[in-house]
Image (tube, rainbow, N blue to C red):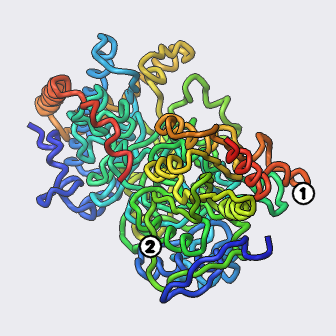
Amino acid sequence: MSDNFGFTDTPKSGSRELTYLEAIAEAIQLEMERDDDVLVLGEDVGGDFGGAFKVTHGLAARFGDRRVLNTPIAELGFTGMANGMALMGLRPIVEMQFADFISTAFDSIVQFASTAHYRMGAAVPWVIRAPSDGGIRSGPFHSQNPEAWFVHTPGLKVVAPSTPADAKGLLAAAVRDDNPVIFFESKPLYRSLRGHVPEGEHVSPLGSAVERRQGSDVTVFSYGAMTHQALAAAEQAAGDGIETQVVDLVSLKPLDTDAILEHATSTGKVVIAHAANRMAGVGAEIAALIAEEAFDSLDGPIVRLGGADTPVPFSPPLEDAYRPNADTIASAIRRLSAY
Amino acid sequence: MCPYLDPRSTLDAAGNPGFGEPAETRFSTLRSMVDPRTQIEMYSWMKLARTFDEQMVAMWKQGRGLGGTFSGRGHEAISVGAGLALGRKDVVAPMHRDLGTYLVRGMTPERIFGNMLGRATGASRGRDANLHGVGDLDLGIIGFVSHLPQSLPTTLGIAMSFKYRSEPRVAMTFVGDGGTTAGAYHETLNMAGLWQAPFVLIIENNQYAYSTPLTQQMHAPNFAERAAVYGVATSSVDGNSVNDVYQTCVEAIERARTGGGPTVIEATTMRMLGHAIHDGAEYVPADLLDQWERRDPVANHRQHLLDTDIASEAMLEQVDTTSRERIAAAVAEAEAAAMPDPDTLEDGVYA
């Protein structure tokens, strides 16, 4: 999709266009300026290099090595270290070089950080930035969407922004939140997606879904980069006279259950699309929620589109077959609209 | 009456945790010998921990316990010696056999028994079992998770926060011989050495990781040599001598506090009972236990106080009696305490 993923947004006063990556970088810089307790740590984040994706480029020159801490390759260790820092009131922003590597830090996240407040009333206010998602020919270990592991873990918050403005606003909110927040960045959007981003302080609430497109026939729930495929699919379906509502979940934990039920009820026809594999994915939880709470409002089966139950393959024909896209989402919309 | 038996004596006038006097006062008194007052205090805390432990084991065998629990019998010199060496603003992440450290820092026997019995008054308010999750940031205690090597990177992060804020504070934690073979241990020591963090790690080598003896855990000759490659200072200490543990910890803490970097202390001891209360530890040779029983840290320190005329038999008997009374009162209070209200199930998942 060359035309900015089909994405357009309305300029507001005090906003200007940034890429998704620039919006994240701006949020980090502003939070570090605002609060000396905010620091960045991770592999290759420091010095002149500024991270594998250059998100932290320039931060070390501005804030020094004290606040931009280059770590050895030790995700379990440095994420555990962030736990200790956060217990003492610091607000570390941990860069996981690729979301795929987060499995290495699993104990530090799902055993210690997520339980600390429940067990001993001690807050662990860190953010893990996790560059996720594929479709960019990066193979099984640089393309993953591991959000379901963390949505399944009590005590964590999980967000997955789809626009530059949300990326900035949600990262600021995540840094200020007193809980551990995993921030899934969609790396296909980093330099490809531009959008209007408010200047200066911009904080978006965690836990709220956003309607990206109005429509009365079918509802598509999605998040992250897949939201843009859903929007493109809605455009295709509009050519067939089907009005599709696209709801960006934004926050995966907590889920905005009120908004999900309200939107599902408004059309009675629900498609859920995400790049993570479908099996026990976030879509399964949303489908179950709607089936339990809004069954009487449904006019057709809930359709879940997600990655195949395989590792994320490398070769283009295989990876394309793995992932939902605008065409497969549009087919699902058309199929469902016939009910 | 020994004043140190009252956990409130660990709070200063402002109610802050510690042991009632600035750590610096203690450091200056202890180069070659631990001062007599501290030696008596160490006995008091060890006796309190031992009395707690014996009462706990008895209760679980009588069916008055809840779930599993872990005895720290034989580990009192390490937990008390290390705990008393810390300053009141330092932070410690003890393990499941470090009861003495919790007590010294001001965690009351009532809150610990309450935790073990699942009461609302327990340190974790019924959330976590036995000594797990017994943490209180106001006391400078971090509650551990069962994945014990997790305490290492957490504690390094605490040490790095002190460095970040240029605070003259130290973070200490413990790991067993078993925990030193996990990745978190090695990742943490590498970073602690790299950044010369104010971090002190005590390896409690108690010979067994559950049923696996040390000879089946590693080929390296000892823990100190294996740790030194990470660029940390190392010491080896008799883990059954509270004086030695205390002095070694004081030196390590002072070095860390003054910018001298991290230390790993290998404290050798013996796990005198099973891995947990259900475990008869038949796999441990009886003569090995006999040999270590003769080195019992509490009995030996008591005898040492008598032999050196630091304390009289009458005084130590008073300590013993007070410990029994203190623990009996704690058990009575914990057993009478309310269970948590099921309506609070979801309270506290999020800050």
Residue B292 in picture, x, y percent from top left: 45, 24
Quadrant of the image occupied by residue A299? top right
Q: In the shown orientation, is residue B127 left or right of residue A260? A: left
Residue in the image at 8% along x and 36% along y: B1
Identify which amino acid the numbered label 2 is placed on.
Answer: Val
Q: In the shown orientation, is residue A299 left or right of residue B19? A: right
Report if the CB atoms under discs 1 and 2 are less than 8 Å apart.
no
Residue A281 or residue A246, whichever sits in front: A246
Residue B337 is marked as none
Callout 1 and callout 2 share a chain:
yes
Is A313 situated above or below B302? Answer: below
Q: Describe the element under mark 2 as helix, strand or loop.
A: loop
Distance from label 1 to label 2 (Cα)?
38 Å
Quadrant of the image occupied by residue A19? bottom right
Query: Farthest residue in the front direction?
Result: A241
Q: Describe the element under mark 1 as helix, strand or loop.
A: helix
| Residue carrying label 2 | A203
Residue in the image at 47% along x and 29% along y: B270
Residue A148 or residue A111, whichever sits in front: A148
Residue in the image at 29% along x and 32% along y: B115
Residue B159 in picture, x, y percent from top left: 45, 62
Identify which amino acid the numbered label 1 is placed on.
Answer: Pro
Q: Chain of mark 1?
A: A
Residue A316 is marked as 1
Residue in the image at 37% along x and 34% along y: B128
